[in-house]
Amino acid sequence: MTFPEFKHLLFETDAEGIALLTINRPDKLNALNNKVLEELDTAISLTEKSDDIRVLIITGAGEKAFVAGADIKELSSLNRESGEKASSAGQQIFNRIEQCSKPVIGVVNGYALGGGAELAMACHIRIATEVAQIGLPEVSLGLIPGYGGTQRLPRLVGKSKAMEMILTGQPVAADEAKTMGLVNDIKPADKALDHAKKLATAMIKNGPLALSHAISAVNASQSKHGFAREASLFGRLCETEDFKEGTSAFLEKRKPAFKGH
Ligand code: CO8
């Protein structure tokens, strides 16, 4: 599959099936303007469509920031109607990331503020670098988080801590983020991407259908229908070739060759 030229994204894939998406606007600390969001949406569609991509890693260009938020210059001209529309549109893109049928790992390599923290939270797994600062400072601009942060932060860290972070607007450093379960792990800046790739490699060994169904079932844990969804997806997998191959390979003491159907 050929990929389009992006203005603010770098999008590369390797032979193993790992796609690396770098938000590339370092002079503005990778702030999410409309163009970045539009390109992000396209990159998610490509990830879903391409059989060559098995895992997506998202990070930010430069040494300072993952993403320092939505572009405040663009935000400043929003009114009631356009504000609600922009919030919904961004939520839809971040929901697509959360619901992506392939694992998405965020490498949070510096500031992840406002929309940047919300993007990181939409990823399935987060690896932070030691200098990462994660926070939702929207109240300091007279706003609230608008790309799903009021929903995802309490799910990840609990209501009390989420309230504290959202109401003070103050960020947490990487070690505190790990303690509260906001990030999975902390690595030095020059090792974080390699660590994410190791996780990706471990995931790629497994059946693609099992991965997509696991993501869907875990996502459903946040709805009251989660148990039913888990049972239904489990049943669906039981009639796949990958299931037959995985169990046969174990019983025959060989490595499975999954085909994704
Ligand atoms: N938007 C636009 N430009 C930004 C942003 C941003 N969020 N963050 C940084 N920049 C720009 C700066 O303006 C500066 O540009 P220039 O060189 O042209 O003046 C450049 O990036 C470098 O930034 P600084 O000079 O400020 O760098 P420092 O190291 O001094 O400070 C900080 C780094 C602390 C990260 C600082 O840049 C900062 O506070 N940035 C803003 C952080 C913030 O408030 N983020 C939340 C924004 S609101 C949001 O994300 C809402 C999401 C939901 C929206 C839903 C509806 C649309």
Image (cartoon, rainbow, N blue to C red):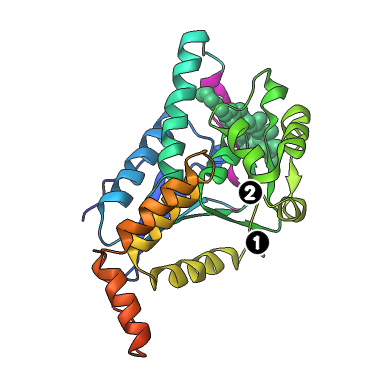
| Residue 64 covered by magenta stretch | yes
| Label 2 close to label 1 by CB (< 8 Å) | no
- Position of residue 208 in the picture relative to residue 190 (left or right): left
Q: How many callouts does the rendering have?
A: 2
Question: Vertically, is 142 above or below 35?
Answer: above
Can residue 255 be seen in the rendering of this structure? no
The three-letter code of the residue at mark 1 reads Asp
112 or 44: which is nearer to us? 44
What residue did someone put label 2 on?
Answer: 64
For the residue labelled by badge 1, is the local secondary structure a helix, a strand or a loop? strand
Q: Which x, y percent locates residue 25? A: 49, 41
Front-most of residues 62 and 139: 139
Task: Name the spot of residue 45 as percent of width and height, x first.
Answer: 30, 44
Mark 2 within 8 Å of ligand 1, using the beta carbon: yes
Q: Quadrant of ligand 1?
A: top right
Which is nearer the N-term, disc 2 or disc 1?
2
Give the residue type that dot 2 points to: Lys
Within-10-Å neighbours for mark 2: few <14, some 14–19, many 20+? some
The residue depicted at 32 percent of the width and 40 percent of the height is: 42
> For the magenta stretch, what is the residue range?
63-75
What is the number of the mark on residue 185? 1
Verify whether residue 182 appears in magenta: no
